[in-house]
Amino acid sequence: MASSRGSENPEGDRRPSEPRPRAGDPSGARSLRFRLGRAAGVAWRVARPPLLAYLLVLVIAMLLENRMIFFPAAYPLGDWRPAGLDPEDAWFEAPDGTKLHGWYLPRENPRAVVLFCHGNAGNITHRTEILRALDDVVGVSTLVFDYRGYGRSEGRPDEAGVLADARAARAWLARRAGIPQDRIVLMGESLGGAVAVDLAAEEGASALVLENTFNNLRDLAAYHYPWLPVRWLLRSRFDAAQQIRRYHGPLFQSHGDCDTIVPYALGRKLFAEANEPKQFLTIPGGDHNDLHSRQYYLQLRAFVERLP
């Protein structure tokens, strides 16, 4: 008779074999969840320091938003007695009572009256070469003013305040020059272009002149900080592309095709949203802070001379 002992486990090894989890067996699912949880824990311990650092950067960026947008040079920084210029001090107040300052350069029988909105850095003393060109070449009367926190203007800048300051400057200029506000030529560089667009969209203008201006601040911020979710972080908008659709007067826009601060493509996007009549001037090799040539101002004069 054949012995059945060969089918038994050897002496001392009587442990039953471990059963395999069957399909749908909850013990298998628990094992998988355990392994996934352990892997997630390891990943969290590895990723936690850089993730927390990134979140800290986001919080700091949100708290310091205005300091990342505006770079004012407060008085006495700058040359407040520029050679060859004798500007009239302009003092006025924003609607919230903030005291503001600017320079007015009147001209007898001007071709136009211009409100100049400068960019996000420096103050009016850093625009003296522009003022000379507008006076000598273009032949216009010009008010250049400082936003709150810049130059001799009081306060601290933010989007709402800067836009309110520009409205106050336009009202002062209209009174001083004795013309309606919508007969003023609004001119802006860089961020000041977005300010000028906001004014033109609100009450119109004799013309709009934009230099190296972006379509909106969020696209510009995304270009400079691609590793931050700036499109939903930023509270400031300066959405010139949206606002310019509401303006229906003449537009003269220029942009350097080598601009390292406001990409040329963003200027073209803004121009695409504008209504006719409009003119775009590409400045070959032009960077953001380059001074314009005399030829540029001659073209600007020709534009002004065609205004009704």
Image (spheres, rainbow, N blue to C red):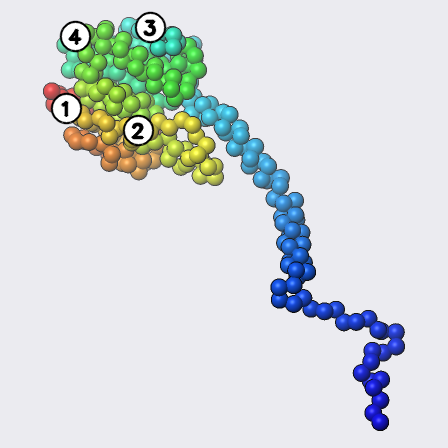
Residue 145 appears left or right of 222: left
Of discs 2 and 4, which sits in the foreground? 2
Mark 2 to mark 4 CA distance (whole Å) = 33 Å
Sequence order check, earlier mark of 3 and 4: 3
In contact (CB < 8 Å): disc 4 and disc 1: no
Mark 1 to mark 3 CA distance (whole Å) = 32 Å
Residue 94 appears left or right of 24: left
Sequence order check, earlier mark of 2 and 4: 4
- The amino acid type, in three-letter code, at marker 4 is Glu
In contact (CB < 8 Å): disc 1 and disc 3: no
Instruction: Using the image, tell me which numbered label, if any, was put on residue 240.
Output: 2
- The amino acid type, in three-letter code, at marker 2 is Ala
- The amino acid type, in three-letter code, at marker 3 is Trp
Mark 2 to mark 1 CA distance (whole Å) = 25 Å
Figure quadrant of residue 133: top left
Mark 1, secondary structure of its residue: helix
Sequence order check, earlier mark of 2 and 3: 3
Instruction: Using the image, tell me which numbered label, if any, was put on residue 91.
Output: 3
Q: Identify the residue under disc 4.
A: 108
Sequence order check, earlier mark of 4 and 1: 4
User: Hey, which residue is sitting farthest bottom in the picture?
Assistant: 1
Q: Is residue 103 above or below residue 12?
A: above
Sequence order check, earlier mark of 1 and 3: 3
Q: Identify the residue under disc 1.
A: 302
Of discs 2 and 1, which sits in the foreground? 2
Could you tell me which residue is drawn at 88 percent across and 77 percent down? Answer: 11
